[in-house]
């Protein structure tokens, strides 16, 4: 917790306060199980499926000290800790505790954006008069959660949501890190580029080739060079790196859509091939959704023929979703309808629209309906893919027979995948 809040006042103009907080519960599901059964305290505890194909959903910090992480196959976790305690998930219970946490936050702060079952952004600039500086509010929230729910949480604070989230991750477990406005760039400089959400292993490898490992080093590379490694998010990432990002709550959700499209040098004439490509695009988009914490109401399939004729067809889900299975289902159905008239395809795109934060939705509708729900499993797979590379995990249904050893996705070049706003 190196940096505390400072009340430095500059001579010119009002002081800018790090009023965006990110609160995230520590080892959430596991901490609830330990709280409910104190005999588990201090032990390597995981929540997840104990079966042969079980995956770790949450790992207590003692389990993490042994190298165990979320999304790890349970068999690997068992190898790392033969004395592992495996607790089966109680999703309905976690959901209830989640609303108790959010209730406490809502008690203190009016401006909240819940982004997952155990985390929320808070804009505390308006709560200042009543409850004090951000550091005092963060302290109050953590203390109330500890006293009323007997659970540990961590808080990061900054002038922007992205930096607040990075700070909360650095504060874990059971800590707090509020970065004063004028020290934002300094705080970020030594951190690895991977600390920025959205800079995945592929971008990290590309940056590594440019000699860039830390966020500070990003700033020394010409923008045009960076853009080749980072794609359309380059300006956003640069603003973050130099401490000038001021994105607050909710900004991300406005009219946002996420999608990917690609043009082929040679027209696709085989309907099965089109189907395979759009299926992979649907998977890619669903991963982007999960990574950014959104669910979508509607998916749009775009197709262009060699003569330039372009059509867009959309399909609306029963409930907002980030599930790759749902997206695939709907885009394939859209394609089946167009296929008799669309003989040659030059370009295809899949876009998720009408986004809303996944807050609660995924848990309420998908997890509770199916305890080992796709949302959960797919999120776990995303993490494993991020960690071990895309070749390590693939869904049977996205692969063609006989291609099982090949990575399931062709990677879109930077610029082909875009986050519209
Ligand atoms: P996280 O906040 O990502 O993780 P965490 O709370 O367990 O640990 P940390 O201290 O690092 O925040 O996720 C919150 C809960 O969501 C987690 O306790 C279990 C569930 N979850 C899954 O079910 N599958 C997953 O792959 C992940 C990452 C989380
Ligand atoms: Mg957490
Ligand atoms: Mg979380």
Image (cartoon, rainbow, N blue to C red):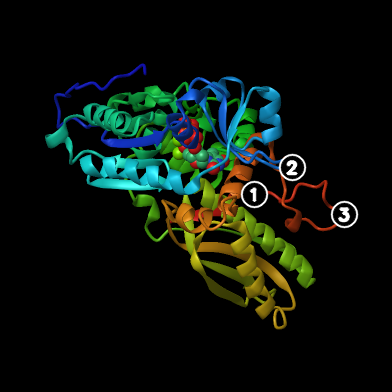
Does 322 sit above or below residue 126? below
CB contact under 8 Å: marks 2 and 3? no
Mark pair 2, 3: CA separation: 15 Å
Q: Which of marks 2 and 1 is in front?
A: 2
Quadrant showing the N terminus: top left
| Pointer 1 residue | 413
The x and y percentages for residue 397 are: 74, 58
Quarter-of-image position of residue 268: bottom right
Mark pair 2, 1: CA separation: 18 Å
The x and y percentages for residue 385 are: 65, 41
Mark 2 / mark 1, whichever is N-terminal: 2
- The outermost residue toward the right is 402
| Pointer 2 residue | 391
| Pointer 3 residue | 402
Q: Is residue 260 left or right of residue 159?
A: right
Quadrant showing the C terminus: bottom left
Report the front residue among 153 and 279. 153
Report the front residue among 233 and 328. 328
Residue at point 17% right, 24% down? 10
Residue at point 70% right, 83% down? 341
Of helix, strand and loop, which one carries label 2? Answer: helix
Residue at point 39% right, 44% down? 98
Does 336 sit above or below residue 159? below
Mark 3 / mark 1, whichever is N-terminal: 3
Of helix, strand and loop, which one carries label 1? Answer: loop
């Amino acid at each position: 917790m190196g940096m505390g809040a400072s009340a430095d006042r500059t001579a010119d103009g009002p002081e800018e306060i790090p009023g965006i907080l990110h609160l995230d519960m520590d080892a959430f599901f596991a901490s609830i199980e330990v709280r409910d059964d104190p005999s588990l305290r201090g032990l390597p505890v995981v929540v997840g499926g104990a079966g042969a194909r079980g995956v770790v959903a949450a790992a207590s910090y003692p389990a993490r000290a042994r190298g165990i992480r979320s999304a790890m196959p349970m068999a690997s976790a068992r190898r790392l800790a033969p004395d592992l305690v495996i607790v089966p998930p109680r999703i309905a219970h976690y959901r209830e505790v989640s609303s108790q946490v959010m209730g406490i936050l809502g008690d203190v702060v009016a401006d909240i954006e819940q982004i997952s079952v155990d985390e929320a952004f808070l804009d505390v600039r308006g709560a200042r008069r009543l409850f004090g500086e951000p550091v005092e509010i963060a302290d109050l929230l953590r203390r109330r959660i500890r006293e009323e729910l007997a659970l540990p949480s961590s808080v990061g604070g900054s002038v922007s949501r992205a930096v607040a989230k990075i700070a909360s991750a650095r504060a874990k477990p059971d800590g707090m890190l509020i970065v004063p406005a004028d020290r934002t760039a300094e705080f970020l400089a030594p951190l690895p580029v991977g600390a920025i959400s959205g800079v995945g292993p592929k971008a990290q490898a590309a940056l590594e080739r440019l000699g860039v490992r830390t966020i500070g080093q990003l700033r020394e590379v010409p923008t045009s060079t960076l853009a080749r490694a980072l794609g359309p998010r380059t300006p956003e990432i640069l603003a973050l790196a130099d401490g000038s990002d001021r994105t607050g709550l909710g900004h991300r959700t406005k009219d946002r859509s996420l999608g990917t499209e690609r043009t082929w040098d040679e027209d696709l004439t085989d309907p099965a091939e089109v189907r395979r490509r759009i299926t992979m695009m649907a998977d890619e988009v669903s991963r982007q959704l999960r990574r950014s914490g959104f669910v979508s109401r509607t998916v749009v399939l775009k197709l262009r023929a060699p003569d330039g004729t372009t059509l867009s067809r959309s399909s609306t889900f029963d409930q907002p979703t980030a599930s790759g299975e749902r997206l695939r289902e709907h885009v394939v159905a859209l394609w089946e309808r167009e296929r008799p008239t669309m003989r040659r395809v030059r370009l295809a795109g899949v876009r998720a629209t009408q986004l809303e934060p996944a807050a609660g939705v995924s848990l309420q509708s998908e997890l509770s309906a199916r305890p080992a729900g796709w949302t959960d499993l797919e999120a776990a797979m995303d993490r494993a893919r991020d960690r071990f590379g895309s070749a390590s995990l693939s869904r049977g249904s996205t692969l063609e027979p006989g291609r099982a050893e090949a990575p399931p996705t062709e990677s879109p070049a930077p610029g082909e995948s875009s986050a519209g706003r």
